């Protein structure tokens, strides 16, 4: 099926290539080569988001695959720009804008620890502790790879401290 999809692409018949890739992924949803090919094929028809989703699924299967690494090397700098914009918005007191930039950055790079830390911090400030902890749980997946384990640990401590303080004020011991 994978080879048939390649042949259909070579023959400029993307519809049949998509059909073959869908059959292949139906039988083996973890087939990284099919995920990558489908992602690239989706990009070729201007379905960037759907193509990115295929690459994120491929990332779940094998984050060390050379095509996945290349994808990440493209996405990370773009997400870094949103991190910078979100940080600037926070310093300017524009929390809603910061959340928008964080969301856009996370669309590009799902588990970027720095963006998740910013998000957790903003949620903690808004007393949305459950969401803050969810962000921190996601951030903890790649904190070692990004060298941010101390930052994540500090944020977890601050979040639990603020939760305790909030409950104490409500006399919910």
Image (cartoon, rainbow, N blue to C red):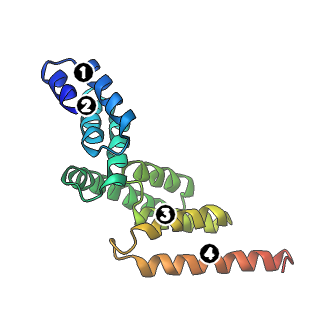
Residue at 84%, 74% in the rendered image: 170
Residue at 30%, 40% in the rendered image: 35
Horizontal side of residue 1 vs 153, given as left or right: left
Nearer-N-terminus badge (3/4): 3
State the residue position of label 1.
14
Measured as percent of width and height from the top left, residue 89 is found at 47, 59
Whether label 3 touches label 4, CB < 8 Å? no
Q: CA distance from mark 4 to mark 2?
A: 43 Å
Tell me if mark 1 has few (under 14), some (14-19) or many (20+) residues whose alpha carbon lies within 10 angstroms of its own: some
Q: CA distance from mark 3 to mark 1?
A: 36 Å
Tell me if mark 3 has few (under 14), some (14-19) or many (20+) residues whose alpha carbon lies within 10 angstroms of its own: some
- Local SS, label 3: helix
Horizontal side of residue 143 vs 172, given as left or right: left
State the residue position of label 3.
138
Whether label 1 touches label 2, CB < 8 Å? yes
Can you tell which of label 3 and label 1 is closer to the viewer? 1
Measured as percent of width and height from the top left, residue 41 is found at 25, 31
Q: CA distance from mark 1 to mark 2?
A: 8 Å
Nearer-N-terminus badge (1/4): 1
Q: Is residue 55 visible?
A: yes
- Report the disc number at residue 41: 2
In the rendered image of this protein, does residue 157 appear above or below residue 49?
A: below
Horizontal side of residue 5 vs 109, given as left or right: left
- Local SS, label 4: helix
State the residue position of label 4.
159
Nearer-N-terminus badge (3/2): 2
Nearer-N-terminus badge (1/2): 1
């Amino acid at each position: 099926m994978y080879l048939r999809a390649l042949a259909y692409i070579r023959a400029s018949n993307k519809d049949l290539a998509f059909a073959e890739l869908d059959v292949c992924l139906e039988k083996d949803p973890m087939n990284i080569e099919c995920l990558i090919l489908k992602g690239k094929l989706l990009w070729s028809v201007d379905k960037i988001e759907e193509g990115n989703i295929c690459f994120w699924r491929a990332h779940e299967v094998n984050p060390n695959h050379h095509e996945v690494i290349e994808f990440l090397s493209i996405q990370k700098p773009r997400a870094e720009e949103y991190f910078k914009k979100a940080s600037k918005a926070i310093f300017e007191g524009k929390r809603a804008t910061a959340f928008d930039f964080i969301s856009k950055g996370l669309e590009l790079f799902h588990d970027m620890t720095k963006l998740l830390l910013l998000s957790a911090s903003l949620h903690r400030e808004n007393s949305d502790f459950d969401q803050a902890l969810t962000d921190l749980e996601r951030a903890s997946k790649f904190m070692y790879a990004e060298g941010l384990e101390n930052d994540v640990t500090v944020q977890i401590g601050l979040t639990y401290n603020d939760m305790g303080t909030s409950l104490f004020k409500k006399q919910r011991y």
